[in-house]
Image (tube, grey):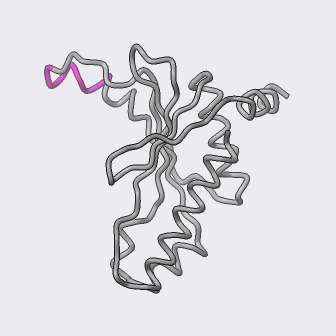
Amino acid sequence: MKKFLAVCAIACMPLSALAADAYTVLFKTQGTFQDVRDSLQFAIEGKGLKINHTNKIAEMLARTGPEIGATRQVYVDGEQFEFCSATISRKMMEADPNAMVMCPYIVSVYTVPNDKSVYIAYRKPGPTRNPALKKALADVEKLLNDIIKQAM
């Protein structure tokens, strides 16, 4: 019940896409990191996709920072979900076997110091002249956008 209420609360939160560099698609919303993170996880799994791994990026940076003399806190919280779609990935790799580098898909969710927003981002697929690959990459982006919109 608690998770259901968190999803309902997230559904009422504003979501906005931000202008970002060419390599990323970035969204910004309000709420707690944990609620947004859980909603994103539910949205991925709700599409019938299996999360292969969760990368704890903020924890890794906090743990390794002192070992290399870094003192700046980059993230308050930050994780990445790795997952794939067998259908879309197959089309992508059939179009170009070199497109394996686009798999798995990764969606990041994070907060930064002195900012109450929660960010969700993914890597933007690069340009290609291959029409079949262009369509498959558009399908990847649609999937990632749909997941984020569903999470919100």
Residue 31 found in image quarter: top right
Q: Is residue 120 above or below residue 85?
A: above
What span is in magenta?
62-69
Image quadrant in which the C terminus is located? top right
Q: Is residue 133 magenta?
A: no
Q: Is residue 132 above or below residue 143?
A: below
Residue 67: x %, y % from top left: 18, 23
Q: Which residue appears farthest toward the left when viewing the image?
A: 69
| Magenta part, dominant SS | helix
Q: Is residue 57 above or below residue 112?
A: below
Which residue lies at the image location 58% right of the left edge and 52% below the top edge?
Answer: 51
- The answer to whether 47 appears left or right of 77 in the picture is right
How many numbered markers are drawn?
0
Q: Nearer the viewer, residue 113 or 131?
A: 131
Q: Is residue 68 magenta?
A: yes
Which residue lies at the image location 80% right of the left edge and 25% below the top edge?
Answer: 2
